[in-house]
Image: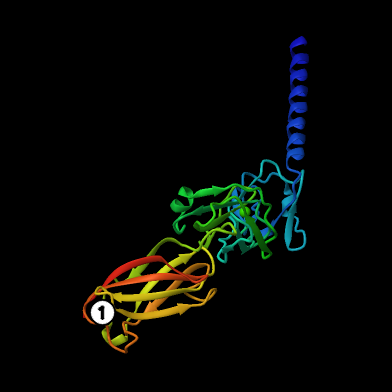
Amino acid sequence: MQKKKYCLKYLFLLIICALIATASFAASSSTNFEIPHQVVDSGGTTAASANYEVLGKARDKAVDTPFSALYKIWEGFLNGVIFRDWNPPARIDDLAATTGVREGEVDLTWTAVGDDGHAGRATRYIVKYSNTPITTRAEFDAATTYVQTWTPETSGSTESKVLTGLDPGEYLYFAIIAVDESGLEGDVSNSPAAVVQIAIDDPVKIVGRIEHEPKIYDPKGGTSNLTLDYVLNRDAYVSLIIFKKSGDLIYKRNFAAGTEGGRLGMNSVVWSGISDFRQIAANGVYVYHIILTEGGQVKSLGRGKFVVFR
Ligand SMILES: [Ca+2]
């Protein structure tokens, strides 16, 4: 008789414990999720919606009740169901970088993406910069982090941010990844570059080196071009001059401040191999200079050599 009484006591305790366990689940799943009804397989183990995968078992038959075209699942309806977000934010593909207004600044703009692709709102951004283009995840990870605590705008909104404290005069490439609330990361954005704003009185200079292609140039009767790429740290009136190695000037072009050849940032200028005397350049070694004409002074900002061989 005494034994039976104890058994009943334990049974009663077990029932109480089970009730507490169910109640504590209800409290921990108060967030509402909307998922297409067909994804919920009552009593099943796993199903997927556009953005959420349902893991675990649906216990309650309430999930069979449609709510418009959706199931609205809220506390008490499901037991032991875990929603796993598998959809990361979309890739930002329109990031733009321009020289900022004040020393050490660069301005970035882009269109915000969402928590799930282009839907919703991402949770945070990872912003990186580097002296070389950031085109892969490995390059992104290796680049320098720009520390910020920006809150992303809703998908589709224009983001506009000023980066400060960068090294004036540097030519930097930027990239951004959006991260959602589950910690899923989108792909690396496009990687635009800009010159970091210099101090007001910093002199004009070419940032880095002048790149020219090809190294051995065949003018092909003026149908091919020698291309020179260089980065200026501000708008300036500059000229391209080309000499024969003997010292004879054969070509000169001026580029007004703010135009291709004389503008802040990357410039790309070409020479078709025709001299100012309307002759195709003869075989030999040539020297070019990018020169600055400012306040009556003429100064070389950079130079290089190439060979004509045709
Ligand atoms: Ca997501």
Disc 1 crowd rating (10 Å Cα; few below 14, some 14-19, many 20+) is many
Can the viewer see residue 301?
yes
Q: Secondary structure at mark 1?
A: loop
Taking 108 as reference, is 4 above or below it? above
Side (left or right) of 24 relative to 261: right
Q: Residue furthest top?
A: 2
Report the amino acid beneath label 1. Asp
Q: Quadrant of the N terminus?
A: top right
| Residue 22 x %, y % | 74, 35
Can the viewer see residue 187?
no
Q: Quadrant of the C terminus?
A: bottom left
Q: Residue furthest bottom?
A: 278
Q: Residue furthest front?
A: 296
| Residue 159 x %, y % | 66, 61
Q: Nearer the viewer, residue 24 or 60?
A: 24
Q: Residue at x 76, y 30 (%)?
A: 20
Taking 253 as reference, is 215 above or below it? above
Badge 1 is on which residue? 218
Q: Nearer the viewer, residue 215 or 53?
A: 215
Side (left or right) of 238 relative to 220: right
Q: Quadrant of ligand 1?
A: bottom right
Q: Quadrant of residue 103?
A: bottom right
Q: Quadrant of residue 38?
A: bottom right
Q: Residue at x 73, y 60 (%)?
A: 70
Side (left or right) of 102 relative to 263: right
